[in-house]
Image (cartoon, rainbow, N blue to C red):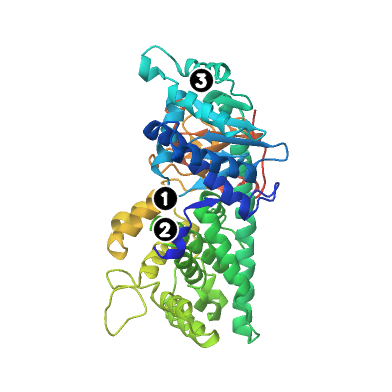
Amino acid sequence: MNNASAKIEYQTIREESRGATAEVTRHSVAALKLFFGIPKTLQVVGKDNDTYKGQLEKFWERFLGITTEEGTLTIKLIEGRFFVNESLCKITRKTPALDEGIARWQELGIGGIEIRYAPESDILARFFEALTKTTSANTVGTLDTETAIEQLRKLLLDNDVYGLRVFSSDEVAKDSNPIEQRRLQMRRQARTVFFKSLRALNETTSNTFSGRETQLRETSNVVRSMVDQVIEDDSALIEMTAIKDFDDYTFAHSVNVCIYSLSIGVRLNFDRNRLSQLGFAALFHDIGKVKLPAEVVKKPGIFTESDWVHMRNHPTIGAKSLLTTFAIDSQMIRAALVAFEHHINLDNTGYPKRTKDRELNLFTRIITVADTFDALTSGRIYITDPIPPVEVLRKMMYRMRNKFDHLILKIFINNVGLFPAGSLTLLSNSQIAIVEKNNPKTPAAPVVRVIGDKFGLKDTVTIVDLSSPENSGITIKRFLDPKETNIDVKRYIYQDIPLAN
């Protein structure tokens, strides 16, 4: 990881409604680090130590930088994620202090805190002292988490700590607005990024092969937007890949491959620059198909030998087009290499044939996995009908395992899951659901949106986490074909259907 990526310790989403700035984000991150570091310092050095006092002063300064117009700061812990003033502060690399802070809050049943009117350092000091004195059920053996919260509130009252409120985990859980706002925001962003990517790829490719001047600035910006989205939460973008009936499948396929490839790159700890190069290469891996006869590219059935002669030429055509059309730099050379290699398998089968075998580029190995999965699940290239994702993954893992890098394939399967986001499914309780996101630890039990049952579709959807204990008896029985069931999956992906109460 290079120096630039090392500086990006935290990634914080933009909150459109508040217009959060980079300065506020910086203060939020610093405030969280201080807030959870202060109790540890207090325990180690005591309240009279200068280091402890200095941290209190620094937290007060950060407080001034992130308070709302009402002079309030709220920190909430929801499902292991921090929200500062209702805006998610995504932490990609946690510090020991944050890990201990999360564990301590969960132990005491604390869900959040509200600080008003910039309290003085001595007020903050008394709060942290009360927090360290609060006992938990594990400590005394008889207290429950509600008693721990009440104990902390009593300590704050007894020590004249005003301007602070402590919320229990149950109280915060009842207020699901931050989670729902986050979910809606990420899905809206995903839709915007996806269609911008389609448009940019279409325009760039059309200009390239019509001799018009081609600018890569918009395409590069779109790729960076996709990188941002995948780093924060790739499930919303992966959901978009479930739509397979675009008029021009070639462009949609390339965008899908870009999304899948970036999701792998993130889990390989690529920095932003490398992710951008990977995304660019994935977006243009099939550019050679644009010069092939349309009847070959769009043919859904079995290829004739003549069709295969055309198809086997597209990697070479694509590589030459990239190298002769655009300025040559490291990004373009890597993209051309991927365009040439993406149908060459790890066991050196595939096409085009090379005079000498050599190790495939890492980007090629990533994009080959993504390309194969999307092609087989789409039913638009080389095969008559789409194959259910779980069958494709089994096919890739066992019957085609020598063709792929095993580590990359494993990362991809763990991320996408057995039931990829956007899949239409029938649950064991006869409900109809669309997969919202994968649970990596329980790939057979994703988070789903229930849209109907045997009596018909509903006007609202219900979010159900199949991995949670209360839903342990519910499983995914099988995939459903949207065409056979006459269910418009696009409606649920493109629109924000309200949640059921």
Do residues under tags 2 and 1 come within 8 Å of each other at their CB atoms?
yes
The percent position of residue 440, horizontal first and vertical second, equals 40, 44
Q: Is residue 499 among the parts visible in the rendering?
A: yes
Q: Are marks 1 and 3 in contact (CB under 8 Å)?
A: no
Residue annotated with mark 2: 264
In the rendered view, would you say 408 is above or below 142? Answer: below
Q: Is residue 396 rendered to the left or right of residue 321?
A: left
Instruction: Choose the circle earlier in sequence order: 2 or 1.
Output: 2
How crowded pointer 1 is (Cα within 10 Å; few <14, some 14-19, many 20+) is rated as many
For disc 1, the marked residue is: 415
| CB atoms of marks 2 and 3 within 8 Å | no
Hey, what amino acid is under mark 1? Asn
Check disc 3 and report its element: helix, strand or loop. Answer: helix
Q: Which residue is mark 3?
A: 152
Q: Which residue occupies 34% across, 52% down?
A: 394
Is residue 458 in view from this perspective? no
- In the displayed structure, 280 sits above or below 192; it is below
Give x and y (percent) for residue 184: 63, 44
Identity of the amino acid at label 3?
Answer: Leu
**Mark positioned earlier in the residue sequence (1 or 3):** 3
Amino acid tagged 2: Ile
Q: Nearer the viewer, residue 179 or 162?
A: 162
Of badges 2 and 3, nearer the viewer stands 3
